[in-house]
Amino acid sequence: MFKKKILLTAVAALTMYATHGAADISAEDVKRLQKDLTPVGAERAGNADGSIPAWTGGLTEAPSGWTRGDDRPDPFANEDPLFTITQDNVDQYADQLTPGSIALLKRYPEFSMPVYKTHRTAAWPQPVYDSIADHATTAKLVGEGNGVDGVWGAIPFPIPKNGNEVIWNHNLRFQGTFLNLPSGLVTVVYNNDQRLEWWFDAKVHYTYYDKSLSESARDEGVMARYASTITAPARDAGEGNLALEFIDAQSKPRKAWIYDPGERRTRRAPNLAFDTPDRPLNVIDDYDMFSGSPERYDWKLVGKREMYVPYNNNGLNSIKHTVKEVYDTPVINPELTRYELHRVWVVEATVKPNARHIYAKRVFYIDEDTWTILATDKYDGDGNLWRVGFNYPVTAPEVPVTAGGFNVHYDLKVGGYYAVNGVTAQDRAQTFDEEPPEAAYYSASALRRRGR
């Protein structure tokens, strides 16, 4: 068991509130978003020893000379690690590591965590901040915590009272309006370097943040529209899926369709959710670290901790890396990763007595500045740590947003990992003809330089 260092005792004292109903945020609470809290609800101040700095607005300007479509630069490329956590010194830093990090460090001598100076680069557009303040007193959980209402274009609970509210902040966090991945990559490595790869084309429309949507379109409650098509290997090329995600997962569950090129037909896919297997070592709701309805779990807000988590990983997500450089069995190349000390919300999800899921318990570590799940530990029915996930986010100041990036899930039983939206080698990346919409480039790992 890891030591739970609760930093916000006032918040932690409220974590046993009911998991549905009104948010119980007053107008005075909302004023805190301009005072001691950031516009998204994070602590504005740094920590006591200064190792976590104060938030001063984040990065909001594109680098000088950078053109949309170019390889996204690493704003901290000239920094060296402060130290590196390895198998030899893991116990020294255990209080600020997830159990999954500790397990990987102790199992794989090849796995290490280079820790850099902390930069609070996260920023969102001002209209999103305004929408958060406007909806903070009206947003509420509905359907026993399985949906939200009274909010649009904002994280609903900037001052959360329970685990349900935190996970909905993750599901509804700002990630831009459109995402275009013309050459994404899924890699699975397991059982003594058996390697499987799928290349895909994907597009996401985050309708929840689309300012051009009409009032009637908003009433439909569509959170996001997702479409993808596999381009390689040849045996799977042409396979595609389409999904609609709603902000009220109780009354409007996810709608999904699959196209099978062999049958040349499209069919509904009601099982494209929860613990339906995706590729080896992964299930559907592992996408984005967690996605979809929270209905199968009871959610407990443990509190907030200072932890070493992936952050500012533009370097890992660069298109300059080849696939071979990144996927270094039995772990991804640790020299390309970057970890920083940040405050994260800790949420435990335990399967409800009347529900089922292959993960009996999951623990999520959610960034206070972006509401992004940066790490997750997943346990089997016997209480054993089974799978460990990390999200290595990208910072895109021209949007501005910190999101997307490289996701990897390690399986401690099989001995392997599943990585999605991974680094794309330039010789496999695809070109495109039109300027994509807003935020289409923030996951540079899946794009090549325009015109090459």
Image: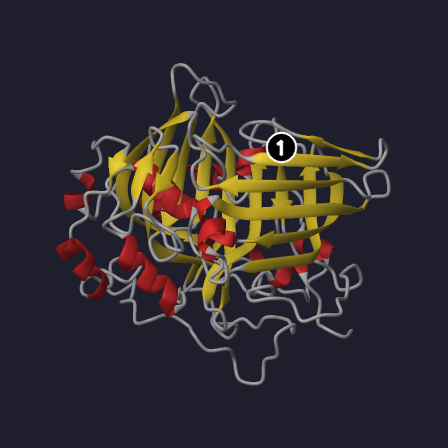
Q: To which residue does mark 1 refer? A: 281
Instruction: Give the residue furthest to the top.
Output: 354
Q: Position of residue 98 (x, y in %)?
A: 39, 41
Whether residue 203 is situated above or below residue 263 in the rendered picture: below
Q: Position of residue 423 (x, y in %)?
A: 66, 57
Q: Is residue 124 left or right of residue 38?
A: right
Who is closer to the viewer here, 152 or 29?
152
Tell me if mark 1 has few (under 14), some (14-19) or many (20+) residues whose alpha carbon lies within 10 angstroms of its own: many
Q: Amino acid at mark 1?
A: Leu
Whether residue 256 is situated above or below residue 383 in the rendered picture: below
Q: Quadrant of the C terminus?
A: bottom right
Q: Position of residue 176 (x, y in %)?
A: 50, 60
Q: Is residue 4 left or right of residue 60?
A: left
Q: Name the quadrant containing residue 382.
A: top left
Q: Name the quadrant containing residue 69.
A: bottom right
Instruction: Give the residue furthest to the front.
Output: 216
Q: Residue at x 67, y 51 (%)?
A: 202
Who is closer to the viewer here, 318 or 240?
240
Who is closer to the viewer here, 225 or 79?
225
Q: Quadrant of the N terminus?
A: top left
Q: Residue at x 67, y 49 (%)?
A: 328
Q: Secondary structure at mark 1?
A: loop
Whether residue 217 is situated above or below residue 69 in the rendered picture: above
